[in-house]
Amino acid sequence: MIRLEGVTKEYAGGVYALREIDLELREGELVVLKGVSGSGKSTILSLIAGLSKPSKGRVVVDGKEISRLPDHFCATFRRDNIGIIFQKYNLIADLSVAENILLPLYPANLPKGELQKRLKQLLETFHIEDKQESLVKSLSGGQQQRVAIARAKINHPKIILADEPTANLDEKLSREFIEILKNLKSQNRTIIIATHDPLFFDLDFVDRYITLQHGKIVDDNT
Amino acid sequence: MMLLIWLVMTLFFLSSSISYELTTKTEHMPDIILTQTKAGREGFVDEKIVDHILEIEGVSRAYAYIKAPYQFKEDISFTIFGVDPFEEIDDPFIAHLLERYNLESGSMLVSHDVKELMKKAYYTKEFNFIRPDGSLKRVQIAKEFDTKNAPHYRWLIVMSKEDARDILGLAGSEATNIAIDVANKLETPLIAAKLKEYYPNAKVVTKKEQKLLYEQSFNFYSGTFLILFSITLLTFFIIIYDRLSGMSSEERREIGILKAIGWRIEDVLGAKFYEAFFIAVFSYIAGVSIAYLYVFYLKAPLLGNIFLHDAFLQTQQFSLAPHIEFFYLFLVFLLVVPLYFAAVIIPAWRVATLDADEVMR
């Protein structure tokens, strides 16, 4: 479903985030990318989401060479297929919970009824119904994380990317997140998590652990 | 931005209202006004000289009238206008009043504002004027009239000439001014010169001179207006320049988030367009409305003093009646709204065209 072929990513100043990476991920797989900070985990997620383009090589997602798509199509592709959970949640502080969750769907011009239906379902799933009108800046870290996951799910994505999703959570909330992950996995979504949180390293429902070091895959443990 | 629009529009409203009132004030003035001076001070003029003035070649009309301020409070003077119902009145406003209401001796017509002020002093049906010798003169309030369309008559009291003379301390044949109309307006300066020659103690002011006096006094304060206006504009341009030169890190992050969750460049710019439209139009409407209320209802406290501080302008008793010049409304709209749009859209476009990854980093 996702293929990275000979991918190199070089940032300004000659800094290499990835070097000649080849990787293939199957549909419905839950993959954990391990590695220290700067090893290239987040860059892989960014390339898969089409948030940046590789300096060399190809990125193919669901049959589309996303690394060659113009920005306009990349955005549409992301909106229709990908949900992203960021390390710092990346919510818009001045918007309410409901507005943040619905944000990916605003440009899609879906009927209001459909938006409300999806929103209600997610608010119930993540137990934040009573917070829907609250501004996200007034929420706790765990609640913000749930809003971020709800936002990533609102467009019914085939692929969910999570970048250091528990970096700002305590152990209890991190375990809660893992439960949510397990549930997402059961819905047959392709999930890729970039993390160095040891809580993820011994989970029975994870399909693959890929270890990165200095922009290269050093271990791919299925 | 709303504050800046408010300030600019306040200045425009003030200046256009005052200049409009000055124009209206001089509109129905006679060609020449003659006032007698005694020991260098303005005194009263004997009506008898009217006959002599009428003999001057070129004078088409001359009549004596009584129009003088009556100090009510420290900062408010009424204008007493003495009329003879059998005489022709030039001023259409006063003429219209006399057509509508029957004015009898011992009664007066007062403007709405005068009536209100008297009411505050517990005078509802009559008012006790104080004569120059300290005795009281009671005059009945016959009717009140509206001055919405003639703001310069905000403090006007119309009464019979006899009552006016009694209150102001004028003798039986005395008046405050003599109005002179000239058949050929080009001859006005010549006739004014003749009048000065015949009556060396008289103060002779032509309509043109009076207009000039008003304009000069107003223009002096227009300089202050220009300085304030320039400072406001400069502040606005600095804000616009600051916005154009780059977005804050928070704004960049927001655009990055929107792109990351699937918004296209046009979606981001569309949202920014609506945001700018809402802010600019709301600020414009709110700024203009608040300025309107501030100037025309609250009578521009503090800022109004810039224009009205001068003793001369103050004695003219400006009512700051609503008068809007649509050119200024349009000018401010053109200066503010498109520039603000540019200041929002251009930086947003610069950021939105970058990779989301780069923007969020």
Image: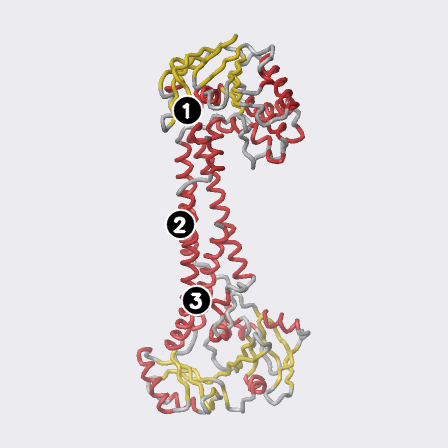
Q: Which residue is mark 3?
A: B19
Q: Position of residue B4 (x, y in %)?
A: 47, 53
Q: Secondary structure at mark 3?
A: helix
Q: Chain of mark 2?
A: B
User: Seen from this angle, which residue lies furthest top?
Assistant: A222
Q: Position of residue A195 (x, y in %)?
A: 54, 20
Q: Is residue A77 visible?
A: no
Q: Position of residue B167 (x, y in %)?
A: 58, 85
Q: Which residue is mark 1?
A: A52
The amino acid sitting under disc 2 is: Leu
Q: Chain of mark 3?
A: B
Question: Which residue is more in the foreground, B146 or B248?
Answer: B248
For image coordinates 52% across by 21% down, the residue present is A83
Please tell me how crowded label 3 is: few (under 14), some (14-19), or many (20+) other residues with Cα within 10 Å.
some
Q: Which residue is mark 2?
A: B334
Question: Which residue is more in the foreground, B176 or B203?
Answer: B203
